[in-house]
Amino acid sequence: MDSNSPEDPLGGFSSSTRRDHRPWGRLQKRATDVREIREGPVEPYGPGPVLTYGNGRSYGDSCMNGRGTLLDARPLNRILDFDPASGVLRAEAGTLLGDVLSHVVPHGWFLPVSPGTRWITLGGAVANDVHGKNHHVAGTFGRHVRRLELLRSDARRIVCGPDLEAEWFAATVGGLGLTGTMLWVEIQLIPIANRGIAVRTTRFGSLSEFFEISKESGGDYAYTVSWIDCLARGANLGRGRFMAGNHASPEEQPPRPRSRRLDVFIAPPLSVINRWSVRLFNAVYHRAPAAAHAVVDYEPFFYPLDAVSRWNRIYGPRGFFQFQCVVPPEVGEDAMRELLTQIGDHGEASFLVVLKEFGDLPSPGLLSFPRAGPTLALDFPNRGSSTLRLLETLERITMEAGGALYPAKDACMSPESFRGSYPRWEELERRRDPAYISDFWCRVTGIEPARGPT
């Protein structure tokens, strides 16, 4: 595939507009200059540093640039090439994963790795080296990228991959969009027989039971994940539901997918997520029947929250914090027990609590988050200082266990924790485009942009 073919994006930019901009966690709102990336000759970016912006599903400040301009990549949304025989797809970096799926699933192909929402862009999936329920067998998204093209602020274009300009590839995968603007991404898809996922759901009564079930299921199922009742205490600490699935066989046909979606049109004046509402939901959900075997459509299995548009508004005008950590397997159960105990002691309730185990397949990026061990993801309504104290406690436990926090979901990680968890960050800094910066990068490294774009 020739990167100079006529169908390639040319990387022009629209004139700047001023927009209110928020990350998905809605913790802050800033009036930000935004320029759309369009076809046309390369133009000057404008004054101040820049940052490429996809569909805005990062929770904290990794997609924020309060010092300059955001480059909106969503107009770059064409599928450039797809081979139904081999499953190789090349698409512009602003293409949503959902649009990729709509194009390839009818041909019998699926994303090799998918996060919990299909409303992120290909460029965002690479920039955060996202993971999914199948990390233990497939690793991260970046492991399935064959090639991508970067546009640097000096108008240089770099095509890179695992065996082509490998240093640029390693810096860009998981590189938070700091090496330049991705123009297109080429990935290898995986074959499927139909839209179905054959799922087994198992209730478990404690954290120890989770680790037993997870160990038993890892070799038999491509996809595993658990919901945890974060308010359970004592002997029931860590109780939940374990979901394991494989792509359905040709004989296992799923039900017709639902097309109707709900929408949260406005944010309520207060968060509807609180200790009482979460306790009621947890009790009902934990006691709900667990199907030994069911075939479901892939959408509710992979993307349950996508059924509600703008669900982030239910947390009210103050927004919410997302916390995700991973700790080494040898201390995994003890660390998870301490984390869940502290959450209960602080009186904070999380509606979305996900626990799974990462495998040991190496991630390709310098700043890739996944590594072997259990990973816990939660969200907390922003209650101010009490929530921040809890997050500091959870960060401390994670760091003492030798773990790491996820930059795509972080809003308050300390510089010390970042540097300890991501020791190769200086290698990325050496390949960072000098015109590109994010609020996250300034916060965790102390580096300010040396100059505006050329």
Image (cartoon, grey):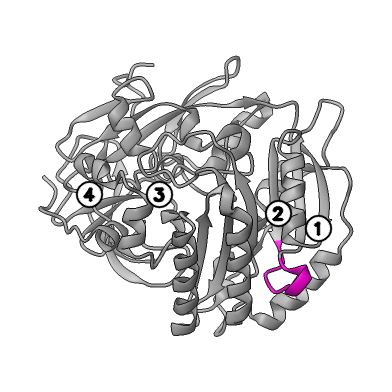
Q: Quadrant of the C terminus?
A: top left
Q: Which mark is first along the chain, 3 or 2?
A: 3
Mark 2–mark 4 Cα distance, whole angstroms, equals 37 Å
Mark 3–mark 1 Cα distance, whole angstroms, equals 38 Å
Residue 104: image quadrant is top right
**Mark 4 — residue?**
436
Residue type pointed to by label 3: Gly
**Mark 2 — residue?**
226
Viewer-side residue, 439 vs 167: 167
SS at mark 4?
loop
Q: Which mark is first along the chain, 4 or 3?
A: 3
Provide the residue span drawn in magenta. 228-237
Residue type pointed to by label 4: Tyr
Would you say the residues marked 2 and 1 are in contact, meaning their CB atoms lie under 8 Å apart? Answer: yes
SS at mark 2?
strand
Q: Evaluate whether residue 244 shows in this view.
A: yes
Q: Residues within 10 Å of mark 3 (few under 14, many from 20)?
A: many
Q: Evaluate whether residue 118 shows in this view.
A: no
Q: Which residue does the image show at 59% across and 54% down from the upper left?
A: 332
Residue type pointed to by label 1: Phe
Q: Which mark is first along the chain, 1 or 4?
A: 1
Query: Where is residue 447 shown, x and y percent of the image?
Result: 19, 57
Residue type pointed to by label 2: Ser
Q: Is residue 408 magenta?
A: no
**Mark 3 — residue?**
54
Would you say the residues marked 2 and 4 are in contact, meaning their CB atoms lie under 8 Å apart? Answer: no
Closer to viewer: mark 3 or mark 4: 4
Mark 2–mark 1 Cα distance, whole angstroms, equals 10 Å
**Mark 1 — residue?**
204
Q: Residues within 10 Å of mark 1 (few under 14, many from 20)?
A: many
